[in-house]
Amino acid sequence: YNTNFNVKKFNLQFDEIRKEARKKADKLVGDTEHNSKKE
């Protein structure tokens, strides 16, 4: 019965994906704010 282990592994991978997505979103927001300040 390795289902619990697989769920934990999946959750870890999902967390990593979410972190990466958040980093990219933050960067996009930061770039947008930076560009709007320049104008």
Image (cartoon, rainbow, N blue to C red):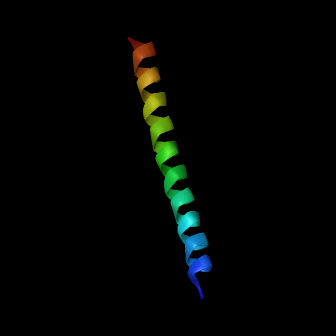
Residue 35, quarter of the rendered image: top left
Q: Nearer the viewer, residue 5 or 21?
A: 5
Establish if 24 lies above or below 31: below
Residue 17 at x, y percent in the picture: 49, 56
Establish if 20 lies above or below 9: above
Establish if 11 lies above or below 18: below
Report the residue that reaches farthest toward the bottom.
Answer: 1
Image quarter of the C terminus: top left
Q: Is residue 5 left or right of residue 21?
A: right
Residue 4 at x, y percent in the picture: 61, 77
Report the residue that reaches farthest toward the front.
Answer: 1
Report the residue that reaches farthest toward the top.
Answer: 39
Image quarter of the N terminus: bottom right
Q: Nearer the viewer, residue 2 or 36?
A: 2
Which residue corresponds to the image point at 41% horizontal and 25% vertical from the top-left?
Answer: 32
Which residue corresponds to the image point at 47% horizontal and 48% vertical from the top-left?
Answer: 21
Residue 38 at x, y percent in the picture: 42, 14
Q: Nearer the viewer, residue 4 or 32?
A: 4
